[in-house]
Image: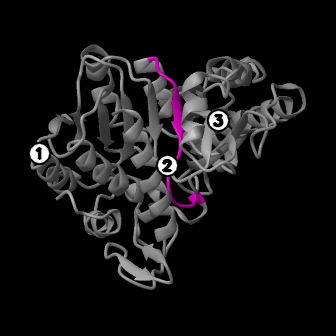
């Protein structure tokens, strides 16, 4: 397996349909087999249903701090999308590899796995780790099952590289995200007598109104970070469902909303602000559940680890923020190590039909990881 190329391996990885609502075990067991054939240590961490797993691999001395490479195995659905070729079949065309997950983020996984195979043949002075998670696309859920275990079993790494698609530019920060579901309750009744009853949709409208007002306040008076396309914390309503018939006063309306917050903002504080501006007569009819959250990422550009990584990348490589979330904040919190995001491919083509990654991007990633390995020898 030592002569396996990233392009060839990516074609194999794309063929595994690891859509988040399906099992990822076929891919994980395949990767486990090729790593173990090179003498690399591999551990699996399963979900409760035993149909998904995180993979953690290591090579080199375990009593030293090393480098951790990380990516997720799951991809978003293809249903309803118009693909020019089968989504789970890698197609090479015009210097690109097309297929679901090619950019987000099996391209990086292929490069990282090949790098691990090479690392197993080197005399490493520090270890190299690889973590492959599940269910990242639905809220960074899967990796949480292995982070506590890693925190207690490995020496805190010098650096963690999250290989999300950044066109091989270096990203040091992204916003955190908290998802809420608000169940707005009312009273059923005949619409001819509507004023006698509490209308759940009217309650929901008060919540939405407050969400909009808080968003305006955050835009005008909140913390700002010019490194982002949207430089402030955002509040967004993504889904509303309620009512059964026009002539029935609705007794329930559900509002799904999110807060994408800057590192210096607190989603709990913003949530409190949202409800402070809702009249008490409506507040008592709203029951809110926190559905999911992941922390933001904030890594200083002045620390030694970041400056070291910059020496391994082309001089024209930019430093910046990314608009999308990653597992990076979770790694940073659990392992107390610096985290950067850098990987092949363009996030602009992710989640779309005809997703692709340029072979040149894979080559650049291979070169970067090879230099990283050499620095550990």
Circle 2 — which element?
A: loop
Circle 3 — which element?
A: strand
Q: Is residue 82 above or below residue 348?
A: below
| Residue 344 forms part of the magenta stretch | yes
Q: x, y percentage for residue 79?
A: 40, 71
Q: Which residue is mark 3?
A: 260
* Residue 294 visible to the viewer: no
| Residue 368 forms part of the magenta stretch | no
Q: Is residue 154 left or right of residue 248?
A: left
Q: Is residue 80 above or below residue 369?
A: below
Residue at point 25%, 16% (across, down): 63
Q: Which residue is mark 2?
A: 164
Q: Which residue is mark 1?
A: 36
Tell me the colour scheme of the image.
Answer: one colour
The Cα–Cα distance between marks 3 and 1, rounded to whole angstroms, is 40 Å
Q: How many marks?
A: 3
Q: x, y percentage for residue 106?
A: 37, 57
Q: Is residue 366 above or below residue 158?
A: below
Quadrant hosting residue 297: top right
Asked whether disc 1 touches disc 2, contact meaning CB atoms under 8 Å apart, the reply is no
Dominant secondary structure of the residues highlighted in magenta in the image: loop
In the image, the segment drawn in magenta is: 336-347
Circle 1 — which element?
A: helix
The Cα–Cα distance between marks 1 and 2, rounded to whole angstroms, is 25 Å
Q: Earlier in the sequence, mark 3 or mark 2?
A: 2
């Amino acid at each position: 397996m030592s002569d396996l190329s990233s392009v060839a391996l990516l074609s194999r990885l794309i063929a595994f349909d690891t859509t988040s609502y399906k099992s990822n075990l076929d891919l994980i067991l395949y990767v486990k087999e090729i790593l173990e054939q090179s003498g690399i240590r591999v551990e699996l961490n399963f979900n409760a249903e035993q149909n998904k797993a995180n993979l953690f691999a290591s090579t080199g001395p375990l009593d030293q701090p090393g480098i951790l490479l990380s990516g997720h195995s799951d991809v978003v659905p293809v249903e309803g999308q118009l693909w020019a070729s089968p989504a789970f079949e890698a197609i090479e065309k015009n210097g690109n590899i097309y297929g679901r997950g090619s950019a987000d983020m099996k391209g990086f996984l292929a490069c990282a796995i090949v790098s691990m195979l090479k690392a197993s043949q080197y005399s490493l002075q520090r270890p190299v780790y690889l973590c492959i998670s599940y269910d990242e696309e639905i809220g960074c859920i899967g990796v949480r099952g292995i982070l506590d275990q890693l925190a207690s079993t490995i020496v805190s790494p010098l650096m963690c590289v999250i290989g999300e698609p950044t066109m091989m530019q270096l990203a040091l920060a992204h916003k955190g995200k908290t998802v809420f579901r608000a169940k707005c309750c009312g009273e059923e009744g005949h619409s001819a007598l509507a004023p006698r009853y509490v209308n759940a949709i009217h309650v929901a409208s008060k919540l939405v109104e407050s969400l909009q007002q808080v968003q305006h306040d955050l835009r005008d008076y909140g913390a700002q970070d010019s490194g982002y396309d949207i430089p402030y914390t955002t509040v967004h309503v993504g889904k509303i469902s309620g009512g059964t018939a026009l002539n029935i006063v609705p007794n329930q309306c559900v509002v799904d909303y999110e807060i994408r917050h800057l590192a210096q903002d607190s989603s709990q504080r913003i949530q409190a602000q949202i409800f402070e501006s809702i009249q008490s007569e409506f507040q008592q009819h709203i029951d809110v559940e926190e559905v999911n959250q992941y922390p933001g990422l904030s890594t200083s550009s002045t620390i030694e680890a970041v400056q070291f990584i910059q020496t391994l990348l082309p001089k024209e490589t930019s430093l910046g923020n990314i608009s999308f979330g990653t597992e990076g904040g979770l790694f940073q919190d659990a392992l107390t190590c610096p985290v950067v995001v850098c990987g092949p491919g363009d996030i602009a083509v992710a989640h779309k039909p005809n997703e692709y990654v340029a072979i040149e991007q894979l080559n650049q990633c291979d070169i970067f990881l090879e230099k990283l390995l050499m620095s550990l020898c």
